Image (spheres, grey):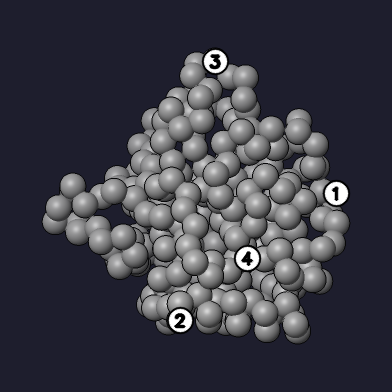
Amino acid sequence: MTNRKLGCKPAETRPLQPRLSGLRMMARKAPARLVRDHIDPAPLMLGNDQIGDCTSVGLANHLRATAALAGYQIDVATGDTVRFYSESTGYDPRDPDTDQGGIEVDVLGIAGRDGYHLDNGAFYPLWGSIDPHDRNAIALIVAGMGAAYLGVQLAQADQAPGVWDTGRVGDNTPGSWGGHCLLLWDYAGLADDDQVTLLTWGSRQKATWRWVQSRIMEAHGLIWPQMVLPSGLYPTGPDLDRLRADNAAYLVG
């Protein structure tokens, strides 16, 4: 079995943390289903089988998922994600004891301030948080921003192969395995039994919304202003202006 490392610390909040609740796009009803079987987001492992760089890998795979939705792809090397993991958490590849994972809001803030650097340039996300138990809001992020950037508390039972759900054999206590950052990419419906597709560890993992509800601890939406999604829900106009202003205020504060 492929090694799978975790690396998302418990969710925290920060003063002036950007929120998406005030955006016009978040007042809508999410599409009843969003199936993207015809699009390959091409998630990569990017070292998350060896170190707990999932918060950095989540950003890299969000870039790749966004590019896939627009019909192309972005190259990301493991060295890119490890470098940003170091920049955003203090990880030192020479000292294994520094491999302690990241806090998502801090990782997002550092990416917005300093950029996520790849060989073809630096990318600066605009982001905001939502109530992690607002299923409609998560679905709106997926539909309008490409994928939702989540922090979850995995259970020991989630180590077994198959669809993630809450009644599997083993310990289903959230957090009994540890914290992890992953992306929610699409969903077959919005009921508890309906399945979603998660991007993690270089693959697509199926789970139920019931599982998401049980394991989730934080949820964030982000866009890359240098990239444009062909979506009618993508933030534009006043929504984009507000997102820029809220992110600027957060960085100054």
Q: Which residue does the numbered mark 1 point to in the structure image?
A: 32
Left or right of 59? Residue 188 is right
Q: Nearer the viewer, residue 253 or 54?
A: 253
- Residue 129: x and y, percent? 60, 60
Residue at horizontal 64 percent and vertical 76 percent from the top: 243
Which disc is residue 169 wearing? Answer: 3
**Is residue 185 in view from this perspective?**
no
Residue at horizontal 79 percent and vertical 42 percent from the top: 190
Q: CA distance from mark 2 to mark 4?
A: 16 Å
Mark 3 or 4, nearer chain start: 4
Q: Secondary structure at mark 4?
A: loop
Outermost residue to the top: 169
Q: In the displayed structure, would residue 250 be above or below residue 100?
A: below
Q: In the displayed structure, would residue 91 be above or below residue 198?
A: below
Left or right of 8? Residue 137 is right
Q: CA distance from mark 1 to mark 4?
A: 24 Å
Q: Amino acid at mark 3?
A: Val
Mark 1 or 4, nearer chain start: 4
- Residue 170: x and y, percent? 50, 16
Q: Which residue does the numbered mark 4 point to in the structure image?
A: 19
Q: CA distance from mark 1 to mark 3?
A: 30 Å
Left or right of 207? Residue 237 is right
**Is residue 251 in view from this perspective?**
yes
Q: Amino acid at mark 2?
A: Val
Mark 2 or 3, nearer chain start: 3
Which disc is residue 252 wearing? Answer: 2
